[in-house]
């Protein structure tokens, strides 16, 4: 900005801008500089962190020699200081992005530090999941109200840590299902950020980060479940919700045209269908393992998965969102058919379930290939080719062939992939030349 300021008088003399425009630019630069932290701010922040770290180390060295009341006061100090900074930012600096982010993050870190110190002062026994549960529960109201970006990122990591720790725990006090109210807090915070124009860059990055993180976290729920096979249904519901949310963001906000939710939703669908294109999953996982048990109806995973699918289907069929979901109509139809087949064919005709899955993969590949050629979009073209080529590879792997046949097969696929893309690029170039 300082470089631009030096050129303004010269631009006025040469008639590039008027004096009124120069004043407007200077006023805008002053306002912008007032909102952005300078070098002194970051140096002061770093210095404060170093001083705070030094004080904490000195206190830790003399911790056992301090009286009980002083130890309790010092344990409460991080939470009180973080809360004071958060209230100051919310009440006095609510228009300043840096102060709001610093306030929410400092309170979150302060609460975590105080909870751990108080448990040490009073020798409170506990586990990592109970600590994370208490920390996130206490901070949830602040996260919903302030919806800080960095605190949301840390909240998401800790929530995933909680569900992972609880899911793999043998403790009877572990309750990984608490992650769903944490997901509610994350959803509300993300919605609040979506309504702010200056949060779009963060949300685009966050959309790539969130789905794989919670795909791992949700997988740990099956560790304590009676019927781990039902995780496939839970993941199907998550894929449906991810697809719908990604398309909804793209439709109502152009800057979300290529977001992580759209990508991970389609990749998740591809992974599920790829697994169930093999007979092993229908015969042994669904037919032999799941439907021979009488208690799967009462399993929480069943109702979580069906709940996800029902919510996604309800949003999808609403008329006011019809245009928003035009690009995923085949995917949603395939998910609904697969869900019905999961229960009906999985119990009575697993072979038919495998054939139906392969048929849906073939139809999805043809649909997106045709869409890519019609719209001259290399993205849709190669997405359709991905379905078709990998379906061919899967079925070719079922046949016992030598290295020569396999080598020729892959060479042929590579050549076909290259020339299909060249054809579409050439067709697109000719049409642009004719228009010009």
Image (spheres, helix red, strand yellow):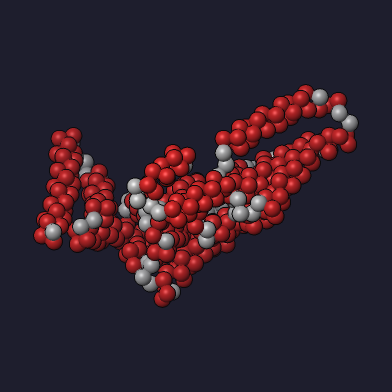
Residue 62 is left or right of residue 194, and the answer is right
Is residue 47 depicted above or below 292 in this figure?
above
Residue drawn where x is 57% and y is 47% of the image: 34
Residue drawn where x is 71% and y is 31% of the image: 52
In-front residue for pair 362/55: 55
Task: Indicate the position of residue 417 as horizontal and vertical percent values.
Answer: 18, 47
**Total numbered badges shown on the rendered structure:** 0
In-front residue for pair 75/90: 90
> Which residue is situated farthest in the front direction here?
13
Residue drawn where x is 41% and y is 76% of the image: 319
Residue drawn where x is 75% and y is 42% of the image: 81
Task: Indicate the position of residue 235 as horizontal and vertical percent values.
Answer: 46, 55
Residue 128 is left or right of residue 265, and the answer is right
Question: From the image, which quarter does the C terminus lie in?
Answer: bottom left
The answer to whether residue 47 of the structure is visible from this angle is yes
In-front residue for pair 123/299: 123
Task: Indicate the position of residue 101 as horizontal and vertical percent values.
Answer: 61, 47
Residue 14 is left or right of residue 75, and the answer is left
In-front residue for pair 235/340: 235
Task: Indicate the position of residue 282 as horizontal and vertical percent values.
Answer: 38, 55
The answer to whether residue 431 of the structure is visible from this angle is no
């Amino acid at each position: 900005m300082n470089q631009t300021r030096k050129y303004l008088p010269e631009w006025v003399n040469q008639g590039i801008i008027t004096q009124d425009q120069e004043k407007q630019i200077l006023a805008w630069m002053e306002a912008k500089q007032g909102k952005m932290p300078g070098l002194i701010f970051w140096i002061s922040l770093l210095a404060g962190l170093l001083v705070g770290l030094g004080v904490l180390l000195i206190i830790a060295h003399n911790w056992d020699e301090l009286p009980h009341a002083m130890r309790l006061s010092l344990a409460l100090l991080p939470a009180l200081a973080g809360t004071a900074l958060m209230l100051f930012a919310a009440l006095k600096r609510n228009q300043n992005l840096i102060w709001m982010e610093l306030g929410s993050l400092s309170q979150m870190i302060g609460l975590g530090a105080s909870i751990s110190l108080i448990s040490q002062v009073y020798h409170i026994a506990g586990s990592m999941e109970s600590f994370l549960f208490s920390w996130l529960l206490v901070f949830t109201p602040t996260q919903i109200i302030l919806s800080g970006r960095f605190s949301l990122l840390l909240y998401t990591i800790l929530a995933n840590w909680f569900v992972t720790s609880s899911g793999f725990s043998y403790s009877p006090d572990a309750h990984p299902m608490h992650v769903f109210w944490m997901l509610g807090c994350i959803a509300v915070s993300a919605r609040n950020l979506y309504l702010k124009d200056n949060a779009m860059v963060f949300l685009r990055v966050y959309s790539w980060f969130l789905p794989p993180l919670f795909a791992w976290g949700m997988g740990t729920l099956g560790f304590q479940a009676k019927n781990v096979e039902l995780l496939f249904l839970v993941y199907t519901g998550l894929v449906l919700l991810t697809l719908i949310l990604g398309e909804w963001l793209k439709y109502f906000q152009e800057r979300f045209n290529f977001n992580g939710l759209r990508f991970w939703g389609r990749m998740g669908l591809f992974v599920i269908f790829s697994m169930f294109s093999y007979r092993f999953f229908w015969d042994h996982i669904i037919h032999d393992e799941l439907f021979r048990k009488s208690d799967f109806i009462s399993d929480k995973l069943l109702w979580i998965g069906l709940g996800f699918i029902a919510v996604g289907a309800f949003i999808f069929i609403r008329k006011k969102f019809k245009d928003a979901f035009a690009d995923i109509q085949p995917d949603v139809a395939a998910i609904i058919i697969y869900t019905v087949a999961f229960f009906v064919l999985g119990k009575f005709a697993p072979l038919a379930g495998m054939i139906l899955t392969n048929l849906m993969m073939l139809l999805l590949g043809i649909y997106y290939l045709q869409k890519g050629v019609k719209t001259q979009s290399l993205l849709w073209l190669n997405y359709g080719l991905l379905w078709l080529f990998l379906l061919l590879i899967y079925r070719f792997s079922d046949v016992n062939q030598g290295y020569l046949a396999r080598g020729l097969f892959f060479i042929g696929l590579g050549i076909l992939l290259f020339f299909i893309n060249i054809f579409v690029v050439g067709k697109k170039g000719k049409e642009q030349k004719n228009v010009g």
